[in-house]
Image (tube, rainbow, N blue to C red):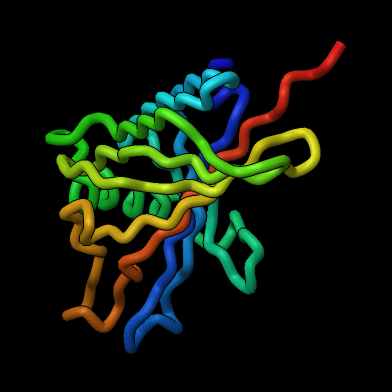
Amino acid sequence: MRVDATTAECRILTYKEGLLSAVAHDLELRVTTFTIGIDETTWRVDARFDPTSLRVVGAVRNGVVDPDTLSESDRRTIEDTIVRDVLDAARHPEILFVSEAATGRGDVLAVHGRLDLHGHTRDLTATARREGPAWVADARLHQPDFGIRPYSAMLGTLRVRADVAVRITIPLPMEG
């Protein structure tokens, strides 16, 4: 099976912290260009993501995305900062996850693989579970493990937590 941004979804959640976090926003981002190949027999996964394709979906408050909190200008500024300063996409134009197998049973799998992000490769396990007509895979990334310094501003009184959440939703093929 092969999916991309037209058939699947990749979302990233960032969380604020620091003295001035009350004036900041948790964010939901969407990756708009990616491909994921999955061998459903061996659970080998080859996933490639374009870091320049990150888009701000909206600010998150109490677990709910509000697409209207941020102006279009604020969205573009955030996206440019992530691509240029956080991910340094000019030097690291692809994010790659490769897995050879998964373990588990039934509707829950642990997908073990290697993530190449920002010039660093680390082991990563994503938990995938069947939710209705889709597989939903969740992983937490600790940015410093990949040489990424979490964004901060105002002398560090406003910053993004080092851990971000990634969620990939892949619809199951329709049975006919």
Q: Is residue 91 left or right of residue 26?
A: left
Q: Give the percent coordinates (x, y) of residue 16.
A: 40, 73
Splitting the image into 4 quarters, where does residue 129 fall?
top right
Seen from the viewer's position, the closer of residues 32 and 174 is 174
Q: Is residue 54 left or right of residue 9?
A: left
Q: Is residue 57 above or below residue 42?
A: below
Q: Is residue 18 above or below residue 72?
A: below
The residue located at (54%, 55%) in the rendering is 58
Q: Give the percent coordinates (x, y) of residue 119.
A: 15, 40
Q: How many marks?
A: 0
**Quadrant showing the N terminus:** top right
Q: Is residue 19 above or below residue 94?
A: below
User: Which residue extends farthest right?
Assistant: 176
**Any part of residue 129 in sight:** no
Q: Give the percent coordinates (x, y) of residue 128.
A: 59, 44
User: Which residue extends farthest left?
Assistant: 91
The residue located at (87%, 11%) in the rendering is 176
The residue located at (21%, 61%) in the rendering is 144
User: Which residue extends farthest bottom?
Assistant: 19
The residue located at (31%, 40%) in the rendering is 115
**Any part of residue 82 in sight:** yes
Q: Is residue 12 left or right of residue 121?
A: right
Seen from the viewer's position, the closer of residues 79 and 10 is 10
Splitting the image into 4 quarters, where does residue 68 fall?
bottom right
Q: Give the percent coordinates (x, y) of residue 55.
A: 44, 42
